[in-house]
Image (cartoon, rainbow, N blue to C red):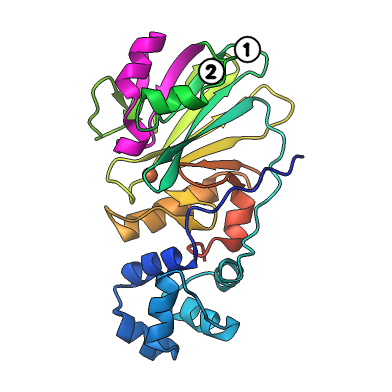
Amino acid sequence: MTKPATFPLEDELGDVLEKAIRRAGLSGEALALRAGVPLGKIFDAIDYRADLTGEELRRLAAVLRLNEVGLCALGSGQYPQPEIGALPFCVWPLRMPHGIGVANAYLVGECDSARAILFDTGAGIEALEAVWPRCIRQLDAVFLTHVEAEHAGGLCDVVARFGVRAAFIPLGAVAPCGRGFGEEEPQVFGPLEVRAFTTPGHAAAHNCYLVRAPAACNGGSLLVSGDLIFAGSVGGAYFSHEQLQSSLHRVLGATPPATVIAPGHGPMTTVENELRFNPFVM
Ligand SMILES: [Fe+2]
């Protein structure tokens, strides 16, 4: 087991409150009234100047239907980041600055091989090249979680550069160089198997991918979650709050607790950690 380097969470308390308020369809005034928390303190928290007591956070969690343990942990800057267990393959997180944030892509492959599979392609080939591990010289396939500039910008360049035969994108998404891939049979690359979950919510066409090595003694698995779930938060529900929640519960319920989550933003986490603490998982 290794303790990962601690990376900043994608969302702070203010982001989580803002997403939850939108999901609840409440005005700030209505939330303040129902939770008994001064409106100014709610707005301050959304502006990253939180001064909420533990009791106020618990009342906000109750009204907004959030996991109060996780919300209070976020509020105190102590959101747990779990140890990441050993996987039967290697994962190279590619963290690329984008705008004011960081977008993640991931390479997954056998540890002693120069071949890998790429999940998401960042904003462009230059950003990818800046973080590309020299040991990876061949790509068997590319999978996109969703077609958004910060995650899919480099797709055609990557396909051309590596002569990739297969670039899989969510069914219903449109991207040059990609072909739709849903929950049919998994794709197999040597010892690795990639299965898609159709997970609308952040976008109408969004996939998560479960990577396993079925024949390995260590049965650990990796969930590439795109912008469905982050450590301590979820992606913006730009397509549908209801569908995002239902995708979230479906994926977390269908994957073993020890599954490592590799999100589109922020640090890696585990299914178990997010089931216990993620504010949006009740
Ligand atoms: Fe994103």
The x and y percentages for residue 100 are: 40, 48
Q: Is the CB of the residue bearing disc 1 within 8 angstroms of ligand 1? A: no
The x and y percentages for residue 200 are: 33, 47
Seen in the picture, residue 159 relative to 194 is either above or below; the reply is: above
- CB under 8 Å between discs 2 and 1: yes
Name the kind of residue labelled 1 in the image.
Ser
The x and y percentages for residue 248 are: 45, 53
- Range of residues picked out in magenta: 138-167
Q: Is residue 186 visible?
A: no
Q: Residue 59 got which mark?
A: none
- Say whether residue 221 is magenta: no
Image position of 41 (left or right of 220): left
Say which residue label 1 marks: 113
Q: Is the CB of the residue bearing disc 2 within 8 angstroms of ligand 1? A: no
Q: Residue at x 56, y 71 (%)?
A: 75
Q: Quadrant of residue 24?
A: bottom left
Q: Answer with the quadrant where ligand 1 appears in the image.
A: top left
Name the kind of residue labelled 2 in the image.
Ala
| Quadrant showing the N terminus | top right
Q: Residue at x 50, y 21 (%)?
A: 117
Q: Quadrant of residue 276?
A: bottom right
Q: Residue at x 60, y 29 (%)?
A: 91
SS at badge 1:
loop
Say which residue label 2 marks: 116
Question: Dot 1 surroundings within 10 Å: few (below 14), some, or many (20 or more)?
Answer: few
Q: Is residue 101 visible?
A: yes
The answer to which of 57 and 110 lies nearer the viewer is: 57
SS at badge 2:
strand
Seen in the picture, residue 250 relative to 184 is either above or below; the reply is: below
